[in-house]
Amino acid sequence: MFKFWGSQEQQEQPRPQEVGQGPAQSWYPPSVVGSPSSSRPATPTGSSSSTSHSFQSPSEAAALITVLKNKSVDELRKLLTDKDAYHQFLLSLDQVKIQNNIRDELREETLQIARGNLEKEPRIMELRNQCRIIRTTELAAAQEKLNELERQKEELLRSCSPASLLQMLQEAMKKTDEESEALHRQFLDKEIDLGSFVMKYKKLRTTYHKRALIHLAAKASPTG
C-alpha cells in the first residue's frame, strides 16, 4: 500500500483494511476516501471545519506528503476514522497555522476599527447638533445680511445709471442757480458788500456753467 513512500519495511505492513475483524469505518464519504485498491490513504478535499485548507502549490503538497510519510499505519488509519484526530492534525500544519493567524489578525483589525467608530459616535452627534444650530441661527442671520447687501447693491447700481447721474447733475445745476440768485438779491438789498458778492457769485456761476456743460455733453453722447 505504501510503495509511494519507498520503504521496504512499510511495504510489508498489512493494509489498514486488513487489520482487525473488518474494514475500518472512515468518517469521510466514499468519494473522499477512495476505492479499497487505492495505493495510499486519500486526503479529504473538504471538511466542515472552518480551518480546512487547500494545498494548491507543489511545495505545499510536498510538505504535506513529507508529514504523512513519517506517520505509522495506525496513525494514518486514525486520521481516516477519527474526525477529532484529523482536525488536530490539520491545525498542526504550518500552512493552516499561517492561514489562521492571518484570519485572527484581520478579525482583530476589524474589531479595532469598529471600536474606533463607536468611540467617535458621540463626537459625530455633537458635530451634527452644531451643524443644526448653525443652520437654524447663524445661517439665517447671514442670509438676512446677504439679502440686505444685495438690496443695497441694486440701489447703488440704479443710482449710478446714466439716467440717474443726469438727473442728479440737473438738480445740482438748479441748486447752484438758485444759490447765485439768492446771493444777487442779497447784494441788491445791500446785505453783502461788493467784494464778497463778486467773489461768491463768480464761484457759483463758474460751478453752474461747468455742470451745465457736463450735462449737455452727457446728453449728446451715444450712451446718454
Image: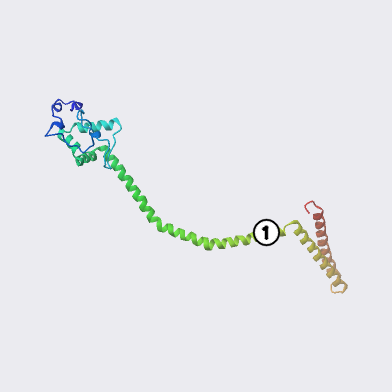
Q: Above or below — where is 102 with respect to 148? A: above
Residue 184 figure quarter = bottom right
Q: As drawn, is 92 to the left or to the right of 126?
A: left
Q: Position of residue 155 (x, y in %)?
A: 69, 60
Quadrant where the image shows the C terminus = bottom right
Q: Above or below — where is 103 with respect to 120? A: above
Q: How is the image coloured?
A: rainbow
Which residue is at the front of the view, 149 or 170?
Answer: 149
Q: As drawn, is 145 to the left or to the right of 89?
A: right
Q: Residue at x 33, y 45 (%)?
A: 106
Q: Position of residue 124 (x, y in %)?
A: 43, 57
Q: Position of residue 45 (x, y in %)?
A: 27, 35
Q: As drawn, is 187 to the left or to the right of 14?
A: right
Quadrant where the image shows the N terminus = top left
Q: Residue at x 25, y 30 (%)?
A: 62
Q: Above or below — where is 58 with respect to 85? A: above
Residue 153 figure quarter = bottom right
Assess disc 1: are there few (<14), some (14-19) or many (≥20) residues with their C-alpha within 10 Å of its C-alpha.
few
* Local secondary structure at mark 1: helix
Q: As drawn, is 145 to the left or to the right of 128?
A: right
**Number of marks:** 1
What's the residue type where badge 1 is placed?
Answer: Glu
Which residue is at the front of the view, 99 or 80?
Answer: 80
Q: Residue at x 79, y 63 (%)?
A: 171
Q: Position of residue 186 (x, y in %)?
A: 85, 72
Residue 187 figure quarter = bottom right
Which residue is at the front of the view, 174 or 28?
Answer: 28
Residue, disc 1:
154
Q: Residue lying farthest left?
A: 21
Which residue is at the front of the view, 73 or 147?
Answer: 73
